[in-house]
Every structure is written in C-alpha cells, then in structure tokens.
Image (cartoon, rainbow, N blue to C red):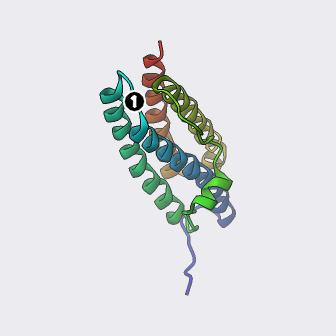
C-alpha cells in the first residue's frame, strides 16, 4: 500500500524536482565512473599524485550519488540506478581511448563544469517549490564541484 506524501511540496513539484535530480544523479555517476577509470589508467610522471587525487575524488563522488538518490527517494520518487538509465539521462560525455594525464585532467574539468551547469539548472524549480533540503544539497555539491574544477584547472597551467 502506497501512503500519501504530505511534505509541503505538491506531487507535481516533487516529480519535477526528482526528474532534475535524476539527471544530476546520472551526471554525477558518470563523472564518478570516469574518475575511477582515470585512477586506474593514469600513467606518467604525475602518476602517484593523480592516482591518489583521483581516488579521493571518486570516493567523494560515490558518497554523493547516494545522497542524491536518497533525496529523490525522500521526495517519493524512484531513483534511476542502471547504466542504461544513466546513459539516457546524463549530459557528461564519456571518454574513449587512451588519454594522457593532462587530457584526463582537462576532461575532468569539462565534466565537473557540466555537472555544475546541471545543478544550477535545478534551482528555479527547487526554489519555486520552497524545497530547502534539495537547495542545500545542490549548494553543497556546487561548492565541491567548483573547487574541484578549479584545482584540476590549476594543474594544467
């Protein structure tokens, strides 16, 4: 038996927020997978630094996908959770081929910036529905992605 959800956000509002969060989840998961791939496959003089840094980043992203999916569930909606669903929802481009360390870093900058744009795109509906928990989640994620993009960008200068 499905119980009625009465948290002060209409069902339509919850559905729209969850749809946006599903896109954000797919972007975050795709970035997680890409970062983990780079952790495994980075080579060159920066190996140890990048291998360790990428591990910290993918670990943080793994925690983030859980927070995002749980927010979708708290809104009463189903969270996507398959490669097929994520592939349809994500706007983060997968990388193909054998990239060198600097190409990996540049690709991660681009990917973090895409995740940032996806998150920013949610604020209008989140604010319209007066959804402070989602607003807080997005703000925290934006701060982290912007800082990570800056740090990665700095490695390319």
Q: How many marks?
A: 1
Q: Position of residue 60 (x, y in %)?
A: 38, 44
Work out whether 149 lies above or below 125: above
Compare residues 129 and 78 and report the one nearer the observer: 78
Query: The N terminus is located in which quarter?
Result: bottom right
Q: Position of residue 45 (x, y in %)?
A: 35, 21
Looking at the image, which residue sits at the far top?
157
Q: Position of residue 138 (x, y in %)?
A: 51, 43
Work out whether 26 lies above or below 14: above
Q: Residue at x 43, y 35 (%)?
A: 144
- For label 1, count other residues whose C-alpha is less than 10 Å away and answer few (under 14), some (14-19) or many (20+): some
47 left or right of 123?
Answer: left
67 left or right of 27?
Answer: left
Q: Residue at x 67, y 57 (%)?
A: 16
Compare residues 14 and 59 and report the one nearer the observer: 59
Q: Quadrant of residue 38?
A: top left
Q: Quadrant of residue 14?
A: bottom right
Compare residues 142 and 34 and report the one nearer the observer: 34
Q: Position of residue 106 (x, y in %)?
A: 53, 25
Q: Residue at x 51, y 50 (%)?
A: 29
Q: Residue at x 47, y 17 (%)?
A: 156
* Residue under pointer 1: 43
Say which element carries label 1: loop
């Amino acid at each position: 038996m499905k119980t009625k959800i009465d948290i002060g956000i209409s069902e339509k509002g919850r559905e729209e927020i969850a749809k946006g969060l599903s896109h954000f989840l797919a972007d975050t998961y795709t970035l997680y997978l890409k970062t983990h791939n780079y952790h495994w496959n980075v080579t060159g003089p920066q190996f140890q630094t990048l291998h360790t840094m990428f591990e910290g980043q993918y670990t943080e992203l793994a925690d983030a996908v859980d927070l995002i999916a749980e927010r979708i569930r708290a809104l009463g909606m189903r969270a996507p959770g398959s490669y097929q669903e994520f592939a349809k929802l994500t706007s983060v481009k997968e990388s193909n081929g054998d990239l060198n360390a600097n190409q990996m870093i540049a690709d991660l900058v681009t990917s973090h910036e895409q995740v940032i744009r996806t998150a920013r795109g949610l604020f209008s509906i989140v604010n319209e529905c007066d959804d402070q928990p989602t607003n807080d989640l997005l703000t925290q994620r934006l701060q982290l992605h912007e800082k990570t993009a800056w740090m990665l960008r700095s490695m390319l200068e």
